[in-house]
Image (tube, helix red, strand yellow):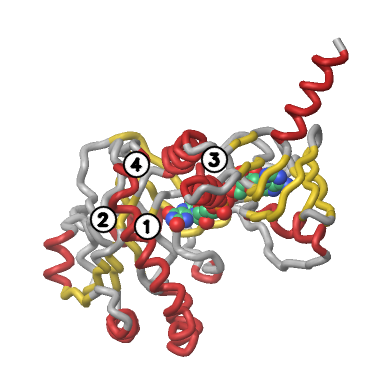
Amino acid sequence: MAKLKRESVDQVESKSFYDLIIIGGGAIGTSAAYHLARGGANVALLEEFDLNTQASGRNAGSLHGQIQYEPFEELGIEWAKNFLHGLSILADSLKLWKSLSEELGVDLEVSSNGGLMIAENSENMRHLQDKVALENSIGIESRLLTSEELFQLAPYISRKMVGGAISPIEGKANPLLTAPAFAKSARKLGADIFTNKKVVGIEKISSGYEVTSRDQKFRVKQILITANAGIPELAKFFGKEIPISDVPVQVSVTEQIEKFVHHLLYFTSEKLTFKQAHSGSLLIGGGWPARYSAKGEAILNPDSLRANLKVALSSLCGRCKSYPDLGWNRKRDSRSQSHY
Ligand SMILES: Cc1cc2nc3c(=O)[nH]c(=O)nc-3n(C[C@H](O)[C@H](O)[C@H](O)COP(=O)(O)OP(=O)(O)OC[C@H]3O[C@@H](n4cnc5c(N)ncnc54)[C@H](O)[C@@H]3O)c2cc1C
């Protein structure tokens, strides 16, 4: 009996020591677990809930590779120049997506038909011209489109649009599949992935850190925090205040319909992203704010839903003679979130 007990303690202890622990099981954490395990690291991942249940499993799956229009217009060219380094990282990551399905052995429904930015006036076109020039200056492929070229590529766009730009490297993937596929491959390579393990304590010890979840302790040499909205709480264990705020945004998913949207679409004048999933569902978003319930859960914001759908109807309804006037106000002043 005593021997058995001794063995089980050893087992727990040996399983609780890792070179590196990743905190957070979204796309970033599971990707890190996969890449680190592939590189030979003795790695574990701790996730508070189940994998891919937060932002990584609830997003619109757009693969972005261009300078976002809103900050470009609002913050100007100097801001955009500083963003160029980040942009080249995005471009590199888009290359990785091309072979990711094959690498992970799961069809992630990746497509790269390009991102179309549509403009409704000449001022928007001037900004697009400057934006395209800056993107091209670091080798990122993008180009302006006349209205005729735009309507040819996307005949469903409103004839009010005066032109646009295309970023051929952009596309989409299925966010429901990506993190689970990374986790599965990471496990195959020896990573330990734990769910329902909220990290509630981190302490410095001589060999590295002791990481405490509600029911277990782990000793590790290094920690990688990929906890997204949970980062500020975890940073406090290192005496750091990280000013990241958690603002929920929402995206609408329609029933599955016949395929007619082949690009990822953005609109210069209002918050909008629009695309069609592999399944046929339209995904309509743009970073419109959701709400928090009294219990602290992110819930639908009906005002955002109405405004978002109105923008989609008015900018995209190229074949409609008119679209229904639903009396919904456009919310130009709430463009605080980035394009999703
Ligand atoms: C509606 C919506 C649409 C979006 N659309 C797009 C898009 O089209 N394209 C795009 O590129 N991006 C989009 N985004 C943003 C994108 O989803 C996020 O940038 C991305 O998913 C972040 O991944 P992550 O792994 O860092 O975070 P998450 O997926 O949020 O993962 C972090 C994980 O950490 C866990 N965690 C937190 N604290 C702890 C703790 N103490 N202990 C253990 N675990 C913890 C959480 O439970 C969570 O699972 C969208 C986001 C939303 C909400």
Q: Secondary structure at mark 4?
A: loop
The reply to whether the residue tagged 1 has its Cβ within 8 angstroms of ligand 1 is: yes
Kindly identify which numbered label has been placed on residue 108.
4
- Sequence-wise, the earlier of marks 1 and 4 is 1
Kindly identify which numbered label has been placed on residue 63.
1
Q: Secondary structure at mark 3?
A: loop
Q: Secondary structure at mark 2?
A: loop
CA gap, disc 1 and disc 4: 12 Å
Say which amino acid is labelled 2. Ser
The reply to whether the residue tagged 3 has its Cβ within 8 angstroms of ligand 1 is: yes
- The residue singled out by tag 3 in the image is 52
175 or 291, which lies in front? 175
Is residue 301 in view? no
Looking at the picture, how far across and down is residue 24, in whole percent?
63, 47
CA gap, disc 2 and disc 1: 8 Å
Say which amino acid is labelled 3. Asn
At x 33% / y 37%, what residue is drawn? Answer: 105
Looking at the picture, how far across and down is residue 232, in whole percent?
74, 59
The reply to whether the residue tagged 2 has its Cβ within 8 angstroms of ligand 1 is: no
Spot the residue most to the top. Answer: 1
- The residue singled out by tag 2 in the image is 112
